[in-house]
Amino acid sequence: MANLKEVRTRIASVDSTRKITSAMKMVSASKLRRAQNAIQQMRPYAHKLHELLENLSGAISQTNHPLFTQREEVNSVLLVVISSNRGLCGSFNSNVIKQINHLTEVTYKEVAQNNKLHYVTIGKRASEHVARYYGNLILAQDDLTEAPSFDEISNMANMIMSKFAEGNYDKVEIVYHEFRNAASQVLITETYLPIKPLEQVEENDFPTDYIYQPDRDSITNDLVPKILKIQLFKALLDSVASEHGARMTAMHQATDNATELLKDLKLQYNKARQAAITTEILEIVSGAEALDN
Amino acid sequence: MLLEVITPEKTIFNGETTQVQMPGIDGLFGVLHNHAPMIAVLGAGKIKIKDENNKFQFIEIKGGVVEVLENKIIVLAD
């Protein structure tokens, strides 16, 4: 039987751990709400932008646009990886890191061997991993996960687009968590550039006769980079929301486990306490008995 | 007519107006009630809004696109 004092110390320590995890859970829940709001705020913009582009897509000569061009040989690749700055969020970061390793060592093995696989990272966990094992980290923007800013993302997207257009990279992929709901996040890897050809919308019988200013082509050329910026921004917001969701779930689990452990420890403590009392009574009684005789 | 000014981070303006002036890339232009459908690219500048009480409001933008359709104006600002 464990001794009383030992059990009491363990109870105190598990109790304080439980307080910490449940506080972290609460913090994540409120951050999650904010992150979810941010995504919802962005949706009307993305939706409207898409609608506009579809209206215009008839005119676009997609094959000539540099960002639409599929390269025949993929000799150099840029990976954009979004992780988080902090841990304690379950398998969130380790999934990202596993995916980086897989892409580097299996999918783009040859590209990596020729030193043509470069990385852009958001979030310390991925940045540190890439810097330590692979190098070729051309940009690390760690503070973006704390405060997603569209301006910063738009600079980053501009840089990526110009490097792609100049031919520095043949393909750009993003790795990030897509937010489904608070309990489920899915890690996805999607091709960012070249842009997948847009689905042609069927011309309806009475198309709205818009006045275009300046003209259809220039408007489309103006909209395409916007769509790309929005896509990157959405990936960031999704990832931030996923991080808080993952942390909330992980902390919820930890709190539950601590509660369970606390229950067992209390039982053990009470058993030990009762045993101690019984022994004490036994000692007193036998002492008194000895005196009587 | 209804005006919405949306940025990727939030909706800045959503309400009734009687007259809107916007900075097109070729110069300022105004939109009144029953304007023809239009899509235009905007440059940097101020959107001037005249609301139902004839009061003016200004919104600074760095650029964007505007769609005018059936008395609904949607500005996608940067």
Image (tube, rainbow, N blue to C red):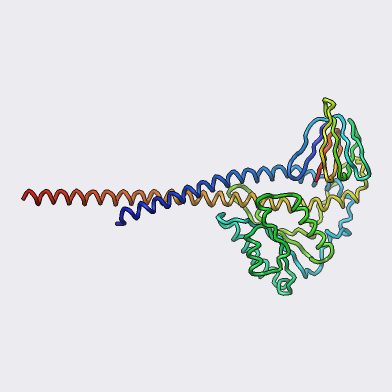
Taking the image as shown, residue A217 lies to the left or right of residue A175, namely: right
B30 vs B41: above or below = above
A194 or A55: which is nearer to us?
A194
A59 or A232: which is nearer to us?
A232
A206 vs A132: above or below = above
Residue extending furthest left?
A: A293
Residue A143 figure quarter: bottom right
Q: Tag count in the figure?
A: 0
Residue B2 figure quarter: top right
Residue A33 figure quarter: top right
Query: Residue A267: x and y, percent?
Result: 34, 49
Query: Residue A27: x and y, percent?
Result: 57, 46
Residue A38 seen from this side: yes
Which residue corresponds to the image point at 77% horizontal and 68% vertical from the top-left? Answer: A76
Which residue corresponds to the image point at 73% horizontal and 41% vertical from the top-left? Answer: B10
Residue A206 seen from this side: no
Query: Residue B73: x and y, percent?
Result: 84, 36
A115 or A223: which is nearer to us?
A115
Query: Residue A30: x and y, percent?
Result: 59, 43
Q: Which quadrant does the N terminus of chain B fall into?
A: top right
Which residue corresponds to the image point at 17% horizontal and 51% vertical from the top-left? Answer: A283
Taking the image as shown, residue A178 lies to the left or right of residue A61, namely: left
Residue extending furthest top?
A: B53
